[in-house]
């Protein structure tokens, strides 16, 4: 029996991107939207299926390295490959209706596939050099995708701002990597940790760690590098907003989890730089700023953009709580929340794309009465936002429960108290969506078309969000197992 390479999901995603471009090049004058979307969907689904198969077969239990240790295939890498692959599949299916009237559809699908390749490589990166290269493989296609609507001023402006802030953060992170290399003599994560354990590294190393942290804070849209996110998510095509705020954020956290637990373990570097204390403060500020800003928005898409910042703050709790009496549960709980968030947040942004397709409008008022004309999609949106708030209608309830309970066990009661206040606040602005959808209105919506791809993606995300509420054990077990192995 032929054994597949451990990096098969990444290879499949990269080959699918090349195949999309090749098919378009063979007959550039013909529209092939269905074929291009099918290739992209097949690539993402195949990569996701392979990652699920590897995880089920126990491939990640004994970590396999490739390219002389630059990449590692373990449970953490497989977990996040399944996550980003699933989100990418939903985005590709939804994009069929969104881009079929636009030029450059092949480039669109290829960029989504290449970004997904970078995200899965980021989750497997075992060297700081690989982390940076993978991060750029995610970032560069993302800049282009945000500005995909070239005739839309907001889209182009958002892309330009995203690129400028991204270039600055890349420079900061690269300089931080050079400082870490200068202090330790290596970029391999285990070797950096060994050097930090054997000798007392000076302030140069501490500054390097903080600058590397800055690069991750940008990629996860966390304070103080969050300000690009609302502009980029609002200006980008809605499916791309879903892609960046779910899959890209998850990949950034995956790399941060590995780097800060393997290369910069607290017991080795706390005397130089206590990054957990920094993250605890940033978690509190990020979730508070994101949720308070979301509560002030009148446009649904912009509200979702700010709320995604709030959720980044929740996930940061998992890393910050490692400073306490923690085990793999609290880090695993952050992974669970990212997994649930991937489906409910993607679904919410895709519903906004559906509303844009119908010309409904952008504000809460524009949504009033939409539930009577589009009950299935509106019911799915109701599940998404209530699950994001943490109510027991979807997986968001369980992921928040595990995250907050494990952080309390780790001794971070004050941080959980702030998170609970923020969750209560989020219920206010998420409920505004539901009230608008199912409220009385005299408005008559012009809903003539039923875009199959968008509808299918919204419904699929809704079904998975609800199903995870009753079948959460495999996700929880895999996440805790991966986190425990990472912590050694």
Image (cartoon, grey):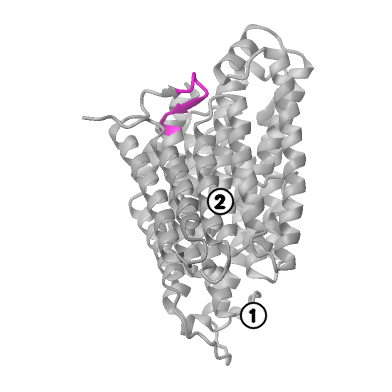
Does 375 sit left or right of 428 as displayed?
Answer: left
Q: Residues within 10 Å of mark 1 (few under 14, many from 20)?
A: some
Q: Which residue is mark 1?
A: 365
Q: Is residue 227 above or below residue 156?
A: above
* 70 falls in the magenta region: yes
Which quadrant would residue 430 be assigned to in this image? Answer: bottom right
**Observer-nearest residue: 104 or 302?**
104
**Observer-nearest residue: 128 or 151?**
151
Q: Can the viewer see residue 31?
A: yes
What whole-number distance in Å separates the C-alpha atoms at marks 1 and 2? Answer: 35 Å
Please give the name of the residue rendered at 51% of the width and 35% of the height, measured from the top-left corner: 121
Please give the name of the residue rendered at 53% of the width and 41% of the height, measured from the top-left corner: 119
Which label was assigned to residue 448?
none
Label 1: which secondary element: helix
Q: Are marks 1 and 2 in contact (CB under 8 Å)?
A: no
Q: Is residue 252 above or below residue 485?
A: below
Which label was assigned to residue 111?
2
* 143 falls in the magenta region: no
Q: Earlier in the sequence, mark 1 or mark 2?
A: 2
Q: Position of residue 446 (x, y in %)?
A: 53, 87
Q: Position of residue 129 (x, y in %)?
A: 62, 26
Which region is colored magenta? 66-76
């Amino acid at each position: 029996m032929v054994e597949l390479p451990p990096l098969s999901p990444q290879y499949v995603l990269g080959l699918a991107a090349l195949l999309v471009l090749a098919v378009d090049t063979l007959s550039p004058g013909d529209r092939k939207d269905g074929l291009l979307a099918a290739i992209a969907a097949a690539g993402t689904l195949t990569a996701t299926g392979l990652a699920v198969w590897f995880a089920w077969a126990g491939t990640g239990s004994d970590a396999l390295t490739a390219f002389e240790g630059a990449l590692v295939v373990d449970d953490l890498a497989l977990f996040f490959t399944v996550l980003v692959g699933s989100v990418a599949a939903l985005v590709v299916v939804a994009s069929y209706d969104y881009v079929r009237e636009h030029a450059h559809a092949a480039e669109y699908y290829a960029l989504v596939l290449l970004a997904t390749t970078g995200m899965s490589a980021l989750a497997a990166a075992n060297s700081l050099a690989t982390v940076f290269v993978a991060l750029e493989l995610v970032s560069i296609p993302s800049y282009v995708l945000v500005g995909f609507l070239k005739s839309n001023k907001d889209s182009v402006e958002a892309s330009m701002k995203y690129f400028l802030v991204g270039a600055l953060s890349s420079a900061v992170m690269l300089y931080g990597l050079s400082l870490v290399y200068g202090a330790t003599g290596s970029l391999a994560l285990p070797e950096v940790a060994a050097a930090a354990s054997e000798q007392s590294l000076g302030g140069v190393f501490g500054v390097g760690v903080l600058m590397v942290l800055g690069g991750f804070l940008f990629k996860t849209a966390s304070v103080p590098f969050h300000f690009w996110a609302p502009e980029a998510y609002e200006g980008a095509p809605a499916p791309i907003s879903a892609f960046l705020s779910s899959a890209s954020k998850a990949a950034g956290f995956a790399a941060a989890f590995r780097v800060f637990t393997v290369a910069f373990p607290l017991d080795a570097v706390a005397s130089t730089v206590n990054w957990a204390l920094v993250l605890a403060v940033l978690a509190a500020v990020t979730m508070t700023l994101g949720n308070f800003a979301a509560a002030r928005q009148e446009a649904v898409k912009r509200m979702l953009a700010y709320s995604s910042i709030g959720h980044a703050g929740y996930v940061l709790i998992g890393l910050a709580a490692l400073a306490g009496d923690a085990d793999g549960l609290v880090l695993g709980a952050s992974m669970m929340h990212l997994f649930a968030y991937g489906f409910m947040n993607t679904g919410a942004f895709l519903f906004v794309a559906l509303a844009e397709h119908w010309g409904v409008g952008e504000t809460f008022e524009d949504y009033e009465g939409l539930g009577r004309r589009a009950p299935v999609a509106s019911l799915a949106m109701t599940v998404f936002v209530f699950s994001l708030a943490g109510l027991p209608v979807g997986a968001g309830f369980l992921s928040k429960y595990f995250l907050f309970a494990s952080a309390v066990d780790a001794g971070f009661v004050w941080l959980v108290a702030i998170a609970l206040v923020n969750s209560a606040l989020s219920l206010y602005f998420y409920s505004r969506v539901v009230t608008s959808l199912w409220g009385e209105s005299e408005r008559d919506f012009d809903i003539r078309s039923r875009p199959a791809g968008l509808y299918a993606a919204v419904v699929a995300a809704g079904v998975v969000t609800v199903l995870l509420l009753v079948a959460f054990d495999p996700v929880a077990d895999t996440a805790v197992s991966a986190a425990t192995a990472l912590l050694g």
